[in-house]
Amino acid sequence: MKSYIDLIEQTFEFPQEEFTVNNNELHFHGVPLMEIIKEYGTPLKLTYLPKISQNIKKASEYFKNAFEKHNYKGSYTYCYCTKSSHFSFVLEEALKAGVHIETSSSFDIPIIRSLNEKGQLSKQHYIVCNGFKRPLYKQYINELINDGFENTVPVLDNLSELEAYEEGAKKPFKVGIRIASDEEPNFEFYTSRLGIRYNNIVDYYKEKIAPSKKASLKMLHFFINTGIKDTAYYWSELSRFVYKYCELKKICPELDTIDIGGGFPIKTSLGFEYDYQYMVDQIVENIQWICEKNNVEVPNIFTEFGSYTVGESGATIYSVLDQKLQNDKELWYMIDGSFITHLPDVWGLNQKFVLLAVNNWEEPFHKVNMGGLTCDSQDYYNSEAHSFEVFLPNVGPQKQQYIGFFHTGAYQESLGGYGGIQHCLIPAPKHVLINKDNSGKITTELFAEEQNSESMLKLLGYKK
């Protein structure tokens, strides 16, 4: 029987930029994972910080190249979508790479304040405030405007939202309008619940924004839930949006920006293929063509990449606790964690991540099912993005097997309730930050210990 490394090398182009094997052990961005496991144990969350800035720089380069290719006269601004991961180490790393910020909740604003107090975010940074806003969120936005955060841009999600800023802001301010896009044909609803419908946009501007002594329209905002894909649906919705920008620009000269939201995909399989530069070229070319056709200046372009910024920096490492043969065909590898609590998108969205053995690459491979620790029948992982099966090294009880799920850095902690109460009281695992200094030396830092029973007892009211 062929070895596990033979299987991977024959199935994919391997090694890859972030995955290499040395002495039958996996390295992630050049980091020897077995050394990390020996130092910190499992289960374990990892964040490789340099990957965050690398992806930001790549995306900025894609737009720079497209602007030069098409002689595009607008500017590009990269906003980080904070809801993908609110951790301080993520925001700090992203800001060092030159991003601006997109928020979605009132609780984002104290984070903005904290970063400003530390000198990591200036009052000149763009703060694009999205979402359907409760009163506290609108109050915090007004306070930012009044305190001199001059590029705070509340994106209006409904027809009555502007009133809160007219009343609370003491100085002129910019606003955006989110347009309610049509969903994909197979979606349960026809039009997004977020944003203002196309037919209301022009009249709303004329009746509410244009007469205002404080508000000026800076931005039109657009977002497609399924992301930036080379499909007829995406291009149709983008074109419709740009045509609306052109219509509004003719009566609103101060409008100079479109925000096309997030949507860059991340690698969820070793067989992942996506031509980022081609997609950016096509976006820029389409926007420019429509604007030229309508005799209006091209807009500045904002994006709000979240998963793309932070997703590929993350990894989740487990030990195989036991092997259970439950019938003649189904072999289970039981891990020392839970998919439902640690990687909730596996359970909730049937999301696939890159799954690889950390060690024992010289051993034969076999088909397995992965089982989590909770009592829920849905706490399993048994298929990969490229196939309907999972293959891992075939090791006996005398050998310890470690496995890793990679590119797990976006949303999983937030959806899983980091530090809270999770199914079967499965604790949040240790979290280790990995960095490289200027000489290429790897450094590690323990960000958080594994959640303990004391914190759970307090949350549940057993201890005060």
Image (tube, rainbow, N blue to C red):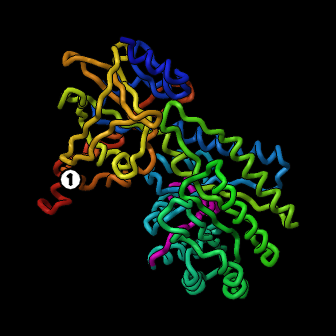
Measuring from the top left, give residue 30's x and y in whole percent: 49, 24
Camera-nearest residue between 111 and 457: 457
Residue 109 in view = no
Is 126 one of the magenta-colored residues? Answer: yes
Measuring from the top left, give residue 336's x and y in whole percent: 24, 35
Camera-nearest residue between 416 and 153: 416
For image coordinates 20% across by 60% down, the residue present is 459
For image coordinates 45% across by 47% down, the residue present is 410
Camera-nearest residue between 1 and 110: 1
What element does badge 1 sit on? Answer: helix
Residue 388 in view = yes
Residue density around tag 1, few if under 14, some if 14–19, many if 20 or more, within 10 Å: some
In the picture, measured across the screen, residue 392 lies left or right of residue 459, that is right
Quarter of the image where the C terminus is located? bottom left
Quarter of the image where the N terminus is located? top left
Considering only vertical position in the picture, is 409 above or below 333?
A: below
In the picture, measured across the screen, residue 232 lies left or right of residue 19, that is right
Instruction: Give the residue furthest to the front.
Output: 328
**Amino acid type, residue under disc 1 in the picture:** Ser
Camera-nearest residue between 215 and 357: 357
Q: Main secondary structure of the magenta part?
A: loop
According to the picture, the residue beneath numbered tag 1 turns out to be 455
**In which quadrant of the rendered view does residue 60 lie?**
top right
Considering only vertical position in the picture, is 166 above or below 219?
A: below
**In which quadrant of the rendered view does residue 404 lie?**
top left
Measuring from the top left, give residue 456's x and y in whole percent: 19, 54
Is 311 one of the magenta-colored residues? Answer: no
Considering only vertical position in the picture, is 207 above or below 389?
A: below
In the picture, measured across the screen, residue 98 lies left or right of residue 283, that is left
For image coordinates 13% across by 59% down, the residue present is 463
Magenta range:
116-134
